[in-house]
Amino acid sequence: MSRVKALIRFLWDFVIGDDWRIALAVLLALAVTLIVSGSSLAVWWLLPLVVVVILSISVWDVARRSR
Amino acid sequence: MNGTQAGLIIAVFIACAVETTEALTIVMAVGVTRSWRSALIGVGVALLALAAITAALGPALTALPINVLRGVVGGLLLVFGLQWLRKAILRAGGLKSMHDESAAYAQESRAAGDAGAVASGIDPYAFLVAFKGTLLEGLEVVFIALTFGSNQKNVPLAAAAALVAVLVVVGVGVMVRAPLARVPENSLKFAVGVMLTSFGTFWGGEGVHAHWPGGEVALPFLIAGYLLFALLTVAALRRLQAAHAGVSSRTARA
């Protein structure tokens, strides 16, 4: 069991990393893009926007905590 | 060769060079301090494990329909790239200590020296540390090479770029017989973070049917945009750190 836990922990660290909100934001952005792309609306801009916003939030959180 | 293939070669080569530099530092430290034979056997076993993982995952990935592959693998690459870019921004902005191969080598050597007497035959400490270091750094390389290669339907090109990087770094390491402290790792990681994030955005978007303006022409714009954003964020963090240091020194003097 401890080996399974260790493997899960390794995979979590490897893929998700220090801030799980980044993975969640990317997942949500991909899901919304998939849904909206079925309509006539252009949605290519959503993913880059989410990247910039979530990276800003994650970095500024570290900056705020370090003060 | 088109622009996307050139980007694939550059990103895989740089990422692989950085990871090989880190693995080389670990292997050299335990090789010099403990046992070269055991360390090299550890590296060999790790390379076999990596080859097995690549052989198992490579064909499975390339067999997926292209949109599923780009959506899932592009998304994973984007999350992975954002981790690299986040760390690179924090390091460049002074909020996280820079990776230093000389310091890593000294620390690894101290730990190896403190691990007791060297065993006759295969030294378990040297074997395990070299195995783990090579496997963990190698997994990142395999992940990047496979995701880039499978998305471009050109795994051999990605594998070739990775192999050349390994040969160059190991060759230089053997020649200088010291950790490669002069490799600008932090700058390279910054560049790789931007590339992975850009390619991940592009492929992830295509996988969920987003239509990029201009098709592949959008990719250089994504790279330039993310690079500009990352540099501006670093500049802002440095200004913030400087302002904070100024306030602290004035408070200390008062």
Image: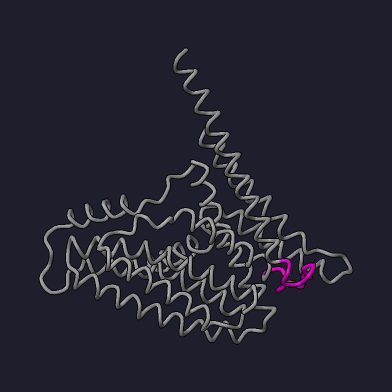
Would you place residue B127 above or below residue B112 in this image? below
Residue B99 appearing in the image: yes
The colour scheme applied to this rendered structure is: one colour
Which of the 4 image quarters holds residue B51? bottom left
- B25 on left or right of A44: left
Q: Quadrant of the N terminus of chain B?
A: bottom right
Name, please, the residue furthest toward the right.
Answer: A40
Q: Position of residue A35 (x, y in %)?
A: 79, 68
Would you place residue B51 above or below residue B186 in this image? below
Which of the 4 image quarters holds residue B33? bottom left
Q: Position of residue B208 (x, y in %)?
A: 73, 71
Q: Position of residue A45 (x, y in %)?
A: 77, 60
Which of the 4 image quarters holds residue B111? bottom left
Q: Relative to the observer, which residue lies in front, B241 or B46?
A: B241
Q: Relative to the observer, which residue lies in front, B24 or B175?
A: B175
Residue B129 appearing in the image: no
Would you place residue B55 above or below residue B17 in this image? below
Q: Position of residue B76 (x, y in %)?
A: 59, 67
Q: Residue at x 37, y 74 (%)?
A: B167
Bounds of the magenta segment: B204-218
Q: Residue at x 60, y 76 (%)?
A: B5
- B10 on left or right of B183: right
Q: Relative to the observer, which residue lies in front, B52 or B186?
A: B186
Number of numbered tags placed on the structure image = 0
Q: Is residue B36 part of the magenta span, yes or no?
A: no
- A52 on left or right of B212: left
Q: Is residue B211 part of the magenta span, yes or no?
A: yes
Q: Residue at x 44, y 70 (%)?
A: B139
